[in-house]
Image (cartoon, helix red, strand yellow):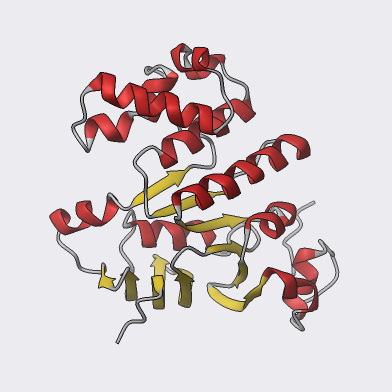
Amino acid sequence: MTDKQNMIEVRGLHKAFGHKKVLTGVDLNVGVGESLVVIGGSGTGKSVLIKNILGLLKPDEGSIMINGEETVGMSAKERLRIMKKFGMLFQGGALFDSLKVWENIAFALIQSLRMPRMEAKDIAMEKLAMVGLDPEVGELEPAELSGGMQKRVGLARAIATQPEIIFFDEPTTGLDPIMGDVINDLIINCVRDLGATALSITHDMASARKIADRIAMIYEGKIIWVGPVADIDNSGNEYVDQFIHGKAEGPIKMAVRG
């Protein structure tokens, strides 16, 4: 029986692309209202994990439960219903160049929820304020925004539909440390205000430490450690220790090409 206190439950998840095995038996829980951050190096399977949970990829084997419902093998119609629970902050912002900022934020409200444009615009402007941007920004084109502003707009779009679950894909990548910290604070506040469950993937330990309730580390397609953020420095796991301190020496071997 599924524990209803878990918003996301992943069991025995496998995913390969040809001969390359990316996920090799991932087990992971995210509690209702919890912020869980998955850390790991490039190519360890973080993005593939999140894409499987979102339904953008189909797992080869395993179970993905969302709020007690099995989503693996769902029909397209049922999948759309589940997708409405989700918000997503993409790594590169992924804003539509042809739409104004407010239209980007309101995209799902208009396209998926069929909300009238002016009603959706009001919500978009409210979310813009939540991420600390002035109303005039709503009328700008994405190309007119700095990297930090694009991340804020992406966050406003992620929370526009009042999602139950928000996914954050490398939320601070490409930002300077100060703007990264601003984004971390906004993530914490937005998730708390919505009462949402959050699942993030990152290799930025400053971000992970700040936004997580718990941290899980993925290595070679499996979760090798999971625990409260307060325990990360005393994990007792040599892989975790090497990663969080950015040490070249250790069990994780990086391919270096001259």
Q: Is residue 241 visible?
A: yes
Residue 255 spot, x, y in % from top left:
72, 61
- Taking 234 as reference, is 194 left or right? left
From what the image shows, is residue 150 above or below residue 166? above
Q: Is residue 95 visible?
A: no
Q: Which residue does the image show at 69% across and 36% down from the upper left?
A: 175
From what the image shows, is residue 64 above or below residue 92? below
Front-lying residue, 135 or 88 = 135
- Taking 38 as reference, is 77 left or right? left
Query: Picture quarter containing residue 37?
Result: bottom right
Q: Which residue does the image show at 76% across and 57% down from the upper left?
A: 256
Query: Picture quarter containing residue 113?
Result: top left
Q: Which residue does the image show at 26% across and 67% down from the upper left?
A: 71
- Taking 2 as reference, is 75 left or right? left
Front-lying residue, 80 or 182 = 182
Residue 254 spot, x, y in % from top left:
74, 63
